[in-house]
Amino acid sequence: MTEKIFKGISVSDGIRIGKAFFYKPFCAKITSDSITEENIQAEISRFSNAILKAKDELSELISNLEKTENKDKSGVIKGQLGFLADPAFSPEINKLIEKRLYNSERAVSEVSEKFALMFENMKNSYMRERAADIRDTGSRLIRILSGGACSSLSEISDEIVLFAEDLSPTDTISLNKEKVLAFVTFKGGKTSHTAIFAKSMGIPAIVGASEINGNFSDGDTVIVDAISGICIVNPDTGTIAEYERKIADEKQKQEFLMNYANKPALTSDGESIIIAANIGSYEDAEFSLSQGADASGLLRTELFYLSASTLPDEEKQFEQYKSIASLFSPKEVIVRTLDIGGDKEVSYLKIPKEENPFLGYRAIRLCLDQQELFLTQLRAILRASAYGKLKIMFPMISSIDELFEAKALLEKAKAQLDDSSYAYDKKIQVGMMIEIPSAAVMADVFAEEVDFFSIGTNDLIQYTLACDRGNEKVSHLYDFCNPAVIRLIDHTAKSAEKGKILIGMCGGMAGDPLAIPLLIGMGFDELSMASTSIVKAKYITLKVSKSNCQKLREEVLKCRDAKEIRHILNEFYHEYIGVI
Ligand code: PEP
Ligand code: MG
């Protein structure tokens, strides 16, 4: 077998060597096939065997989960196992096979849907949540009956390098990072949420590697070099040895950088920068603190919605936000209100498919339309503000009217809490994301209405350059160095300074080593990034002076194209920071 090298887009740093596993999500196609009377017994025993196989799979899954940090998830699987043994379930399926001559797949689909609907209509929220488990159990049985393999990414039980056509953000957060050493997808762009979540979980990842499709088999040895953006299939022994050395070097660099985790990020001329973390869960929050985060500049609350099977209620959200607020206290956490839509789909919200989801019903647009959902979240955040230092941030604001509407709803949520005598931080600060060009252009006006800005470059770049952040075909155009993007960012920073409000950035650019000196030169107070980028960002800040960074900004603002800007940023990096 000869060694082959394939290129992709590196989205989460790291190098791993492992065995390939191609994940093909199972898509159940239920045929409405009937059976004949002579086949009834054979069909019933086919169904019983599927039940046995499903029980085996679930038991193995429970014992695997109980050995990992995800042991709390085993309760859900135990519930599914219990459902298979429910005295009403199998007999009802057998009846459909016997009396109506349904094949097993059709009978399972009908009966599990009937049970799921029954649970969905129950008053008790715990029972309602079981509907998704019942559907999951039904899909497992149908997959087994149709001869499909591995049904869920969370079930991967061997150490592998995962290959997939594409992964959704929800797929990515369900990955078992103990087992998935790295992943490679054929589709996807630089700052899709799949890429962002891989980075926050510390899983090396390459996306948009279209040419690798069809050029590897399960079990092949592969090297994922997610620093250079290449994947090597069937490397020869020399290449493996070379990469083992690189892995050892990376480990050493990381150990060196960890010395900076607990240092304050001060430039050599005394300017202090808050190096903060983007987080989406309690585990992320813990990890970010271990990396030395000075604050959290972005709590992506939608992750709590993405990982749930039904809409989380106020109490549940309150507990989640409260635990993070207390963990970070006295450090600050910027809680971003729900940003669902775009590439983040939540099945239970039943958002109709859209032609252009990134330009459609997303984030604040959805929240202003579904006000009860928004008020529930705002009350939960406000209540949690009594347990730490929280700030509230609205995503995807495109006009001042939206900001006024969102602020009015926040006041309504406060009044509701006052009526029920709940405690909350009455002076909670309110900010907005600048991630739509219209907001960046109008930043001087917005600065009079909020306490802080945080620039979301992941979206700002895609909307400014008309370039889908998740599409590998246009990823060469998706570039923070584009002077139009740089000018919008600079205008926003200047507007914040004039309006005497805080300016932060929480898009991917904030953690890019090349961009950090430029952002310091533009006057950013806070840079919020994936936790894995924090130690390096602190190292860089300590190596530069604000006055040199300001000169860099002046030079960059004179440039006419992205290439020139990247060249200047590279030169500065090599002069003041060096090779680390
Ligand atoms: C951004 O757009 O830069 C951002 C931080 O938000 P998200 O990536 O969640 O859209
Ligand atoms: Mg965004």
Image: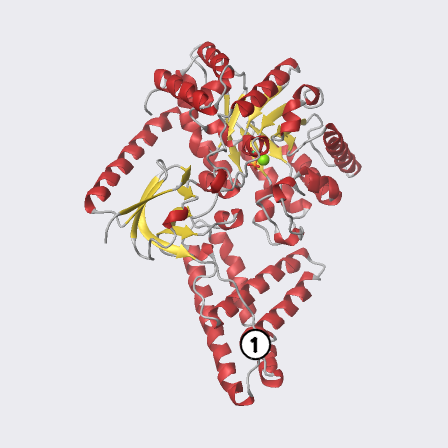
Q: Is residue 341 visible?
A: no
Tell whether 431 sits left or right of 94: right
Which element carries disc 1, helix, strand or loop? helix
Q: Quadrant of ligand 2?
A: top right
Tell whether 194 sits left or right of 380: left
Q: Is residue 426 visible?
A: yes
Residue 246: image location, x then y, percent: 27, 36
Q: Residue at x 49, y 44 (%)?
A: 194
Residue 526: image location, x then y, percent: 54, 23
Q: Nearer the viewer, residue 95 or 467?
A: 467
Q: Nearer the viewer, residue 267 or 283?
A: 267
What residue does disc 1 label? 90
Q: Residue at x 48, y 49 (%)?
A: 167
Q: Nearer the viewer, residue 438 or 549?
A: 438
Q: Residue at x 33, y 57 (%)?
A: 217
- Tell me: residue 441, above or below residue 229: above
